[in-house]
Image (tube, rainbow, N blue to C red):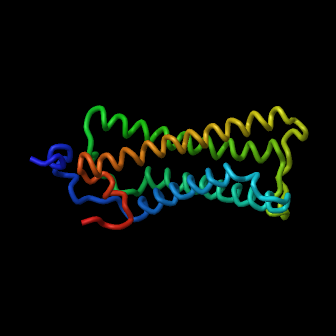
Amino acid sequence: MSASIVTQPAETRGLRYDPTTIALHWTTAVLVVVLWSIGQTVDFPPTAALRNDYRSVHIVLGAVLGTVLVIRLVWRMTRHRRLPPNDQGLLLLIARLTHFALYVLLFLTVVLGIGTAWTRGDTLFNLLAIPAYDPGNRPLMRLVHGWHALAANTVLIVAGLHAVAALFHHFILRDVTLRRMLPWELR
């Protein structure tokens, strides 16, 4: 008997998430990687104007991520296709805790990103000013930015573990966990 038959209940074989759920999942994943990459390299541009534009892209994409997260939660609570779980027992508990942690960490990161923009004061593409909450309070700015960076790094670590788990399901357990969320069908 193959591992896929043992670990995968019969009622889950061949089922896939709906296209909206899949699109929101992968949009979130791409945004997280792009935002984290920009956050790590935001000080690299050689001029202040380029750094401001680069930071502006980061802020705008962060707002897009926040919007996508709200849409995901509303969709998840109201309309998405509910599939029976592939796992049972401890693996199911770990999967549910990981998903919950990712949502909490993503929202925390977005909120702390907003806090970072407000504590530092900023401009978006030199067109729109974000006023500083407490101008000149550098300790507050460093504190909020530090928490934002820590939350973003934690999101990337947990998301990486989430991806490793999906690959484990696909290559070791040989079940449909990964295939259910792919934007294309694997044969």
Residue 138 in sight here: yes
Give coordinates of residue 27: x percent, y percent: 51, 60
Residue 165: where, in percent of width, then height? 36, 44
Image height of 14 relative to 98, above or below: below
Residue 124 screen position, x and y as percent: 79, 60
**Is 21 on the left or on the right of 38, as rendered?**
left
Check the image and name the residue furthest to the right: 136
Number of numbered callouts drawn: 0
Task: Name the residue: 66% across, 43% down.
Answer: 111
Q: Is residue 153 left or right of residue 24?
A: right
Can you say whether 5 is above or below 89 in the image? below
The reply to whether residue 124 is visible in this rendering is no
Residue 94: % across, % down? 37, 35
Task: Depth check: give the residue in front, 101 or 152.
Answer: 152
85 sits left or right of 23 in the view: left
What residue is at 49 percent from the left and 41 percent from the top? 158
Compared with residue 49, is residue 107 higher up or lower down, i.e. above or below? above
Which residue is at a point 56% across and 45% down the rendered structure image? 106
Query: Hey, which quadrant is residue 63 in on the image?
Result: bottom right
Give the position of the C terminus as an image quadrant: bottom left
| 160 with respect to 186 (left or right) | right
Task: Reply above or below: 129 against 185.
Answer: above
Res 51 quadrant in image: bottom right
Q: Furthest-left residue in view?
A: 1
